[in-house]
Amino acid sequence: MKQRMHRMRILSEADTVLAVLTVREMAAQIGMNKGASAALATAVSELATNVVKYAGRGTMTLRALTRREQPGLEAVVEDHGPGIADVERAMTDRVSTGGTLGLGLPGSKRLVDEFELKSTPGKGTRVCVVKWG
Amino acid sequence: LSAGDVRVVLQPIGDLVLLPLQGQIHPDLLTDLEGALLDYLQQHGARGVILDMVGVEVLDQHDFDGLRRVVEGATLMGAPVVLAGIRPSVAAGLTMLGVDDSWVRAVRTVEQAMALLR
């Protein structure tokens, strides 16, 4: 029996690793191709790392989807952390000369098919991504 | 050297060092790896270091930055580093993340890396 949904807490770097492994495992279970699975796992790794770094704790909820017999995975990564004050800026690629890493949001968006970000300063951040394939 | 379920073993091959990376690597692991590698280089020295990337399927920008520190540290200690066998999923992911890869020397196989460093 395929597991259609999985929810886990993200509290530490070990959990970000576990989140990636969970995405890979569930993607394999539903027959997603390896490229799509790796792309989603990379995006989830970025998002989960942001949770640990900026919010301290959060959750990831994975849901298996089907569209015209094509498998897909939805990952919702959310926290009740400080939120993002300037979403537009966070979604813009910055050429970083000082070597500082941004939130990786524009890159994560490029890695997936659907990307939805909701953030309220002081309340938290919710990112929903979907990958088909 | 191990962190979680990931193990990295430093393998001396002549005057080179081979580091096969396996599984889901993460910044903490890479920090430990950097320490172990730099200690090794201080004690034994090496003409070069090969990071075998074949076992890595997912790498985000934080991991990539950790990798950069390993490479730069070893390079500063006189052992240039070559990355061998980066998977297409990793290459495509890093390209889409838009990382700076100007510090990377990459080849397809460990054999090619050995030839390059000898």
Image: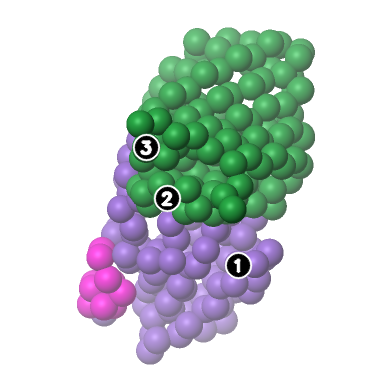
Chain colours: A green, B purple
Q: Nearer the viewer, residue B62 or B93?
A: B93
The numbered dot on residue A69 is: 3
Residue wearing tag 1: B6
Q: What's the CA distance linking mark 3 and mark 1? A: 36 Å
The answer to whether residue A82 is above or below residue A85 is below
Three-letter amino acid code at the position of disc 1: Val
The residue lying at 69 percent from left, 48 percent from top is: A15
Three-letter amino acid code at the position of disc 2: Gly
Image quadrant in which the C terminus of chain B is located: bottom left
The numbered dot on residue A2 is: none
Q: Nearer the viewer, residue A19 or A71?
A: A71
Q: Residue furthest front?
A: A1
Q: Position of residue B5 (x, y in %)?
A: 65, 67
The residue lying at 45 percent from left, 85 percent from top is: B12
Residues indicated by labels 3 and 1 sit on the same polypeptide chain: no
Q: Nearer the viewer, residue B25 or A26?
A: A26
Q: Position of residue B100 (x, y in %)?
A: 37, 40
The residue lying at 66 percent from left, 20 percent from top is: A125
The answer to whether residue B93 is above or below residue A55 is below
The numbered dot on residue A31 is: 2
Span highlighted in magenta in the image:
B107-117
Mark 1 falls within which chain?
A: B
Q: Are marks 2 and 1 in contact (CB under 8 Å)?
A: no
Q: What's the CA distance linking mark 3 and mark 2? A: 11 Å
Image quadrant in which the N terminus of chain B is located: bottom right
Q: Residues within 10 Å of mark 2 (few under 14, many from 20)?
A: some
